[in-house]
Amino acid sequence: MIIHLEAGTCPSGINLRALNQSAAQCFQWRHFVDGRFREDMIDCLDLEAEWTEKPYPFICPGCGLTSSKLSGLFQHVESRACPQELDCGPIKKLVYWLKVRHEWDIPIRVRI
């Protein structure tokens, strides 16, 4: 679902920038967002256009791996490549925040 929204073609209007903004506004943001990018994310800016190097604003709280997109963070966590899981700690709080903020009543799944 996150990949679908990041593509920017969903009729809901939720896109990559809206997801970035939501993640940056989450109370637990320090656990999974690099602070250098936070203000730009809150302002819904195009990170690729704002930064000279490719931005990797998302950080796995379990192992520190960085990702350029929220979907990449979720895919990493779901892959079991590190100890972080979707249903515990800061990622669980992020999932809950996204569901509440965007009024989703379905589980967030990265893979089909």
Image (tube, rainbow, N blue to C red):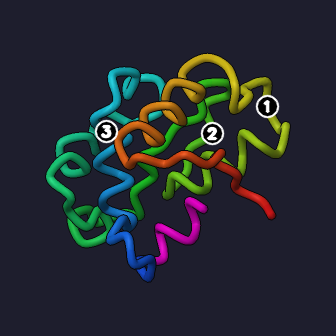
Label 3 packing within 10 angstroms: few (<14), some (14-19), many (20+):
many
Q: Residue 62: horizontal and vertical position, in percent?
A: 67, 24
Pointer 1 residue: 82
Q: Residue 98: horizontal and vertical position, in percent?
A: 44, 41
Would you say the magenta stretch is mainly helix, strand or loop? helix
Tags 2 and 3 touching, CB below 8 Å? no
Highlighted magenta segment, given as a residue range: 1-7
Q: Where's the N terminus, which quadrant?
A: bottom right
Q: Which mark is residue 65?
A: 2
Tags 1 and 2 touching, CB below 8 Å? yes
User: Viewer-nearest of labels 2 and 3?
Assistant: 3
Disc 2 on helix, strand or loop?
loop
Tell me which residue sits at (20%, 62%) in the image: 45
Q: Which amino acid type is shown beneath numbered disc 1?
A: Cys
Q: Residue 109: horizontal and vertical position, in percent?
A: 70, 52
Label 1 packing within 10 angstroms: few (<14), some (14-19), many (20+):
some
Q: Is residue 79 above or below residue 27?
A: below
Disc 3 on helix, strand or loop?
helix
Pointer 3 residue: 24
Residue 5 forms part of the magenta stretch: yes
Q: Earlier in the sequence, mark 1 or mark 3?
A: 3
| Disc 1 to disc 3, C-alpha distance | 22 Å
Farthest residue in the right direction?
Answer: 80
Tell me which residue sits at (26%, 62%) in the image: 51
Q: Which amino acid type is shown beneath numbered disc 3?
A: Ala
